[in-house]
Amino acid sequence: MANKKLTILAVCGSGVVSSSMISQKVEDTLEPLGIEAEVIGLLPTSVEEYVNRGGIDFVISTSPIPGEINVPVIKGVGLLTGFGEEEILEEIRETAREIVE
Amino acid sequence: MRQLPSICSDSGHVGGGSVFSPPQTRNDISGCRKKMSKIIISDDLIELDLGAGSKEEVIHTLSDRMLARDLVKENYAGNVLRREKEFPTGLPTSIPVALCHTEAEFVLESALAVATLKNPLEFSQMGSLEKKVQAEIVFLLALKDPKKQVPWLQKMMNVFKDKDTLQKIRYSENKQELASYLQRVFE
């Protein structure tokens, strides 16, 4: 199977601090599925506009996101604490699989 | 994740950058993982068993430590508190923590200050203004260029997830030893 590439927004209050923390986790989770992840850190207030421009496959966030987001949004705080981490990773895998299939 | 192409031109990622006009809020973090700037950790930026009565007091105490070394600007603490209201940083880790920080414009040099609290203090939980955590450790993070500190931030996440490390920090009784320990953790 050829490698698929997904573009994912990682969202947090600063657009970089906790989104950076979770980015590697997202990439490492998808790699064994043959899915390459390009992760972009973003502020919550920019997400709606960014997603509406197209090209974003899903969003993972540690902050509430205002507006209507028409791609899947995964809550990512558990990746920072380790609690519920496996459930979040499975949600990432499931979401990614559905998109590439 | 990727870094802004303008900052990290060797990132090798052009796809996203060419598709979108880059808003200033966007940070492409994937590329510059190897680049890392130093983050100061030292005993004078540590408070052990701090008897603070509010999160404001902890943040001011730690910010004053940073100010004394000219690591942050005068208005740093106020902006950490402003940001904490909008984007809370409490985390329900095995020992609850808060990871307070603010925008890079208030930072002169990157540093990490730490307080262990005599009495846990209430912080709102990251991602939710309703949920609260009773933080026992407060990390105050001053990042001058967070996009260059991605590997460091990933180590920080591993600290949150590791109960033993959090316990060592929580029950540390010596600032010098804790500073050396944290320096090793973030090496």
Image: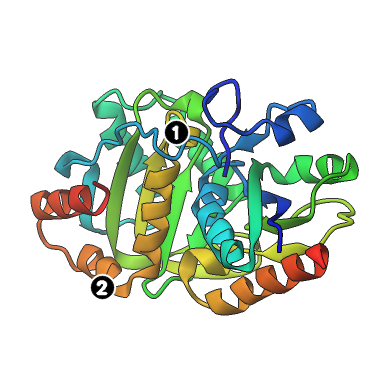
> Which residue is tagged 1?
B148
Using the image, determine if residue B1 lies above or below residue B79: below
Give the chain letter at badge 1.
Answer: B
Of B13 and B103, nearer the camera is: B13
Q: Position of residue B157 (x, y in %)?
A: 42, 58
Q: Secondary structure at mark 1?
A: helix
Name the residue at 58% across, 61% down.
A31
Name of the residue lying farthest toward the front: A1
Q: Position of residue B159 (x, y in %)?
A: 34, 61
Numbered disc total = 2
- Tell me which residue sits at (67%, 30%) in the image: B14
Query: Please, is residue B106 above or below residue B122 in the view?
Result: above
Q: Chain of mark 2?
A: B
Q: Amino acid at mark 1?
A: Lys
Residue shown at 20% from the left, 47% from the top: B183
3D distance between C-alphas at marks 1 and 2: 28 Å
Which circle's residue, 1 or 2, is located before the other in the chain? 1
State the image coordinates of residue B111 (x, y, percent, origin top left).
32, 36
| Dots 1 and 2 on the same chain | yes
Q: Is residue B74 visible?
A: yes
The residue shown at (25%, 27%) is B68
Q: Quadrant of residue B132?
A: bottom right
Reading the image, the residue beneath label 2 is B164
Does any portion of residue B55 appear in the rendered image?
no
Compared across the picture, whether B183 is left or right of B121 comes to left
Residue B115 is situated, as x and y percent measured from the top left of the image, at 28, 54
Q: Amino acid at mark 2?
A: Asp
Quadrant assignment for the N terminus of chain A = bottom right
Secondary structure at numbered mark 2: helix
Horizontal side of residue A2 vs B9, given as left or right: right
Of circles 1 and 2, which is in front? 1
